[in-house]
């Protein structure tokens, strides 16, 4: 899951993969957190689709408060690296059948 597929970039941002990759490369270097947030969201969406089996189920899960994540929406947590790691770890546990 290290490389984000063009298909998931397009699904995540509603744009062509070429445009998204260009924007990620050319984005203002003084705002790296914005680039990281987009990449982290795309990776979380891709992982959630793998776990839940469809984009609609994955998006529903990402947009609803999660008890395990202290009542926060997983989507909001993907905006910073610590939250992103929590979301990805929890998705992995769900995928393995180990969750609360």
Image: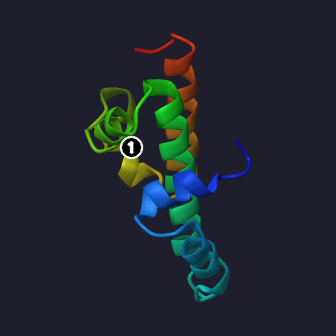
Image coords of residue 50 (percent x, y): 53, 30
Residue placed most toward the observer, 53 or 32: 53
Residue that carries the numbered disc 1 in the rendered image: 74
Image coords of residue 19 (percent x, y): 55, 77
Q: How is the image coloured?
A: rainbow
Residue placed most toward the observer, 17 or 52: 17
For the point 52% across and 63% down, the residue is 37
Residue 8 vertical position relative to residue 36 in the rendered view, above or below = above
The image quadrant of residue 40 is bottom right
Residue 17 vertical position relative to residue 75 in the rendered view, above or below = below
Q: Secondary structure at mark 1?
A: helix
Q: Is residue 83 visible?
A: yes
For the point 59% across and 89% down, the residue is 28
| Quadrant of the drawing holding the N terminus | top right
Give the tally of numbered discs.
1
The image quadrant of residue 58 is top left
Q: Is residue 64 left or right of residue 82?
A: left
| Quadrant of the drawing holding the C terminus | top left
Mark 1 residue crowding within 10 angstroms, few (<14) / some (14–19) / many (20+): many
For the point 43% across and 26% down, the residue is 52
Residue placed most toward the observer, 51 or 66: 51
Image coords of residue 60 (percent x, y): 28, 38
Name, please, the residue furthest toward the right.
2
Residue 61 vertical position relative to residue 82 in the rendered view, above or below = above
Image coords of residue 56 (percent x, y): 32, 38
Residue placed most toward the observer, 60 or 22: 22
For the point 63% across and 80% down, the residue is 22
Q: Is residue 45 left or right of residue 69?
A: right
Q: Is residue 79 visible?
A: no
């Amino acid at each position: 899951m290290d490389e984000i597929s063009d298909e998931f970039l397009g699904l995540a941002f509603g744009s062509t993969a070429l445009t998204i990759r260009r924007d990620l490369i050319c984005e203002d270097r003084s705002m790296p957190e914005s680039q990281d947030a987009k990449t982290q969201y795309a990776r979380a969406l891709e992982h959630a689709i793998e776990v839940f089996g469809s984009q609609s189920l994955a998006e529903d899960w990402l947009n609803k408060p999660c008890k395990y994540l202290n009542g926060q929406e997983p989507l909001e947590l993907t905006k910073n690296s610590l939250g992103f790691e929590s979301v990805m770890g929890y998705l992995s546990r769900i995928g393995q059948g180990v969750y609360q």
